[in-house]
Amino acid sequence: MKKRDLMGQMRQRIALQAKTITKSEGIPLENWTTVATVWAAVSDISGKEYFQAGALQSEVTTRIKIRYRTGITTSMRVLYGSRVFQILSVIDKDERHYVIELMCKEVIPSGG
C-alpha cells in the first residue's frame, strides 16, 4: 500500500491518553490526561461475548493505525468518541518509523 493511500484512510480523530495518579486526602485517584490528538484509521477486527462473574461481557479487538510517533506505551489508552480502548501492543509497522499499529481491546462497561 502506498503511503499516500494509507494517509487517506486516517480519517478518524483519536486522543492518546496517559494515566496519572493524584492523591486526595491520602486516597489515590486515577485520572487520564490527553497527551496527543491525532488522525487515525480505526478498524474493528473481531468481537466476542462471554459470561464472566454471572454477567454478559463484550470484548472487541480493534486495530488503530496512526502516523509514527515515539512515546506510546501499553500503559496508555485511546479515546475515540465515546469509545475507550486499552492498548495491548504498539507495533512499528515494518520497522520503518512511518506507521504505528495499536492493537487494542475496547473497554465496555458492564451492562453496556
Image (cartoon, helix red, strand yellow):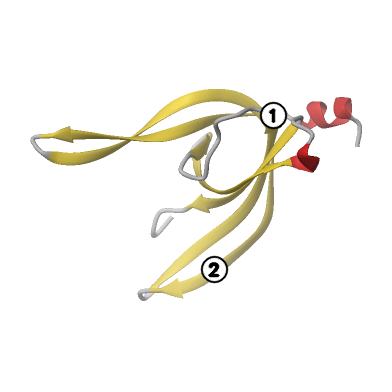
Tell me residue 9's x, y (percent): 79, 32
Which of the labelled discs sits on residue 68, or is there none? 1
Q: Quadrant of the N terminus?
A: top right
Q: Position of residue 23 (x, y in %)?
A: 17, 34
- Observer-side mark, 1 or 2, equals 1
Residues marked 1 and 2 touching at CB (< 8 Å) = no
Circle 1 SS class? loop
Q: Residue at x 45, y 26 (%)?
A: 34
The quadrant the C terminus occupies is bottom left
Q: Nearer the viewer, residue 67 or 50?
A: 67
Q: Residue at x 53, y 34 (%)?
A: 81
Residue under circle 2? Answer: 49
From the viewer's perspective, tell me whether residue 77 is left or right of residue 38. left
Left or right of residue 25, residue 107 in this image: right
Q: Image check: 15 left or right of 93?
A: left
Residue 76 spot, x, y in % from top left: 47, 39
